Amino acid sequence: MITPPKRSGGPRLAGPLAVGLMSLLVVTMLVYQSQQANQSVVSQLQAQIQDLRDRWYGAPAIYQPPPIADTDTKFFDVTGSTQQQLIHSLDTSDLCKKYPPCASDPANPNGVAWGLEGGALVENTISCYSPSTTTVAFREMVVLPKWSPPADGTVKISLVERWDALARVIYTHESAHVAIAHQDIADLNHQAQQQPTCDALFKFWDDPHVFDKLEADQAAYHARLRADCRPDIGCIPPGWMGW
């Protein structure tokens, strides 16, 4: 009887194969962990680079409102390095206490003003030799916010861009009030110059209702904004750009 030879090679191959597979798995895990660590470092570096790019060092420039004809422009300081800090500074500026009185604005029921417009006589007395040659001069005034952040990277470019957009809307709003005042004052002067005598001219300007149309036209501007609130015509929609 011939006995088949024993297969002794199988058991000897199992050990090295298992070790080889385990070694490959360990190497794969180490490579994966190394890649993950490198990716984390790269992401951190990219975030740091982006943070530096987002910081403001003077560009874009802070918006500077252009002058308005026959109008004095005054500024009040706004402080802060975040949007919420700027909003708080605007809300606590107390413009209506510093430049009273403030006309009620239905578009701003909380009574907080971020800009103002007003007008006054250039001279307290009117001199008249002939109504047709007498023009009563008024001077308009606007009060606008002014923010001067340090150009050292402590504020973000995005905040400056949002501020510039807001400042333009406030300027547009107040300059629209000035345009209405200029037109209505010109119309009043034209009516006054049609009076037959200087006494009649004085009575015209002394009438307590002489500015009723001007006030109505200013209120009508606010009404138009309530019906169609857009930044390009001087209105800030709720939540617009975070304001």
Image: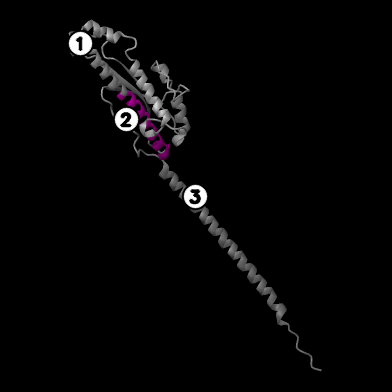
What is the secondary structure assignment of the residue under circle 1? helix
Q: Name the residue under label 1.
A: 131
* Disc on the earlier residue, 2 or 3: 3
The reply to whether residue 148 is in sight is: no
Verify whether residue 217 appears in magenta. no
What is the secondary structure assignment of the residue under circle 2? loop
- For the view shown, which residue lies furthest in the right direction? 1
Residue at left offset 34%, top offset 12% = 209
Give the dominant element type of the magenta stretch: helix, strand or loop. Answer: helix
Instruction: Using the numbered discs, state the Cα–Cα distance from disc 3 to disc 1 in whole angstroms.
Output: 76 Å
Quarter holding residue 233: top left
Question: Which disc is residue 44 wearing?
Answer: 3
- Which of discs 2 and 1 lies nearer the camera? The answer is 1
Q: Mark 2 points at which residue?
A: 65
* Disc on the earlier residue, 2 or 1: 2
Q: In this view, does 135 lie above or below 167?
A: above
Picture coordinates of residue 235 (x, y %)?
40, 30
Verify whether residue 158 appears in magenta. yes
- Which of discs 2 and 3 lies nearer the camera? The answer is 2
Query: What are the residue bounds of the magenta stretch?
Result: 155-179
What is the secondary structure assignment of the residue under circle 3? helix
